[in-house]
Amino acid sequence: MRVVVLADTHAPRRWRGCPPQVAAQLAGADLILHAGDVCTADVLDDLATFAPVRVVLGNNDGPDVAAWGAPESVLLELDGVQVAMIHDSGPKVGRHRRMRRRFPGADLVLFGHSHIPLDEIGDGLRLFNPGSPTDRRRQPHGTIGVLEIGTGSLLRAEIRAVT
């Protein structure tokens, strides 16, 4: 299973349609996960033309994103891997412990908010932030995440530059 992870697209200010480099990564995805700050539900409609989409609410998301189906957090079982997703995981200090308490059965927690890509394992939990494809802030590139999941394990997790 190939899963593309996005966060912090910030439409329409930063996302004025799916950038070609992002579209190239979305091609062939089995699932798209968006960790919030979509800002307009139109982005989700666009993403859904590539693959099914699951999304969580970000602090900049409005009622249209909530109406599209975005809860505050989501728990998914993807081919035997327990995946949790939330927009804001809080401060860096204590993050692994905090996310383990919040999602005790999770193997992987996806989040956004900081726009800083992260792939880190601690306390038996993998934390993954894809960064932002459109609002890189102080990062050298806009980024997304790509996960490959198969028969009960996360085979590969990559942060890919798209700008």
Image (spheres, grey):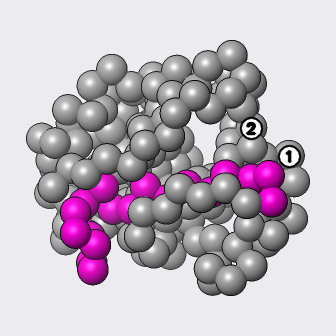
**Labelled pair 1, 2 in contact (Cβ < 8 Å):** yes
Tally the marks. Answer: 2
Q: Which residue is mark 1?
A: 105
Which secondary structure type mostly characterizes the magenta part of the structure? loop
Residue 48's image quarter?
A: top left
Check disc 1 and report its element: helix, strand or loop.
loop
Residue 4's image quarter?
A: top left
Q: Is residue 83 above or below residue 26?
A: below
* Residue at position x 52%, y 20% in the image: 1
In the image, residue 50 lies at what x, y percent?
31, 27
In the image, residue 83 lies at what x, y percent?
68, 42
Query: Closer to the camera, 132 or 39?
Result: 132
Q: Is residue 63 left or right of residue 134?
A: right
In the image, residue 112 lies at what x, y percent?
49, 64
* Residue at position x 15%, y 47% in the image: 19
In the image, residue 156 lies at what x, y percent?
52, 33
- The amino acid type, in three-letter code, at marker 1 is Gly
Q: Which residues are magenta?
A: 123-143
Instruction: Using the numbered discs, state the Cα–Cα distance from disc 1 to disc 2 in whole angstroms.
Output: 7 Å
Q: Is residue 134 above or below residue 149?
A: below
Residue 119 located within the stretch drawn in magenta: no
Q: Is residue 44 visible?
A: yes
* Residue at position x 63%, y 71% in the image: 89
Query: Closer to the camera, 132 or 126?
Result: 126
- The amino acid type, in three-letter code, at marker 2 is Gln
Which of the marked residues, 1 or 2, is nearer the chain's N terminus?
2
Q: Which residue is mark 2?
A: 82
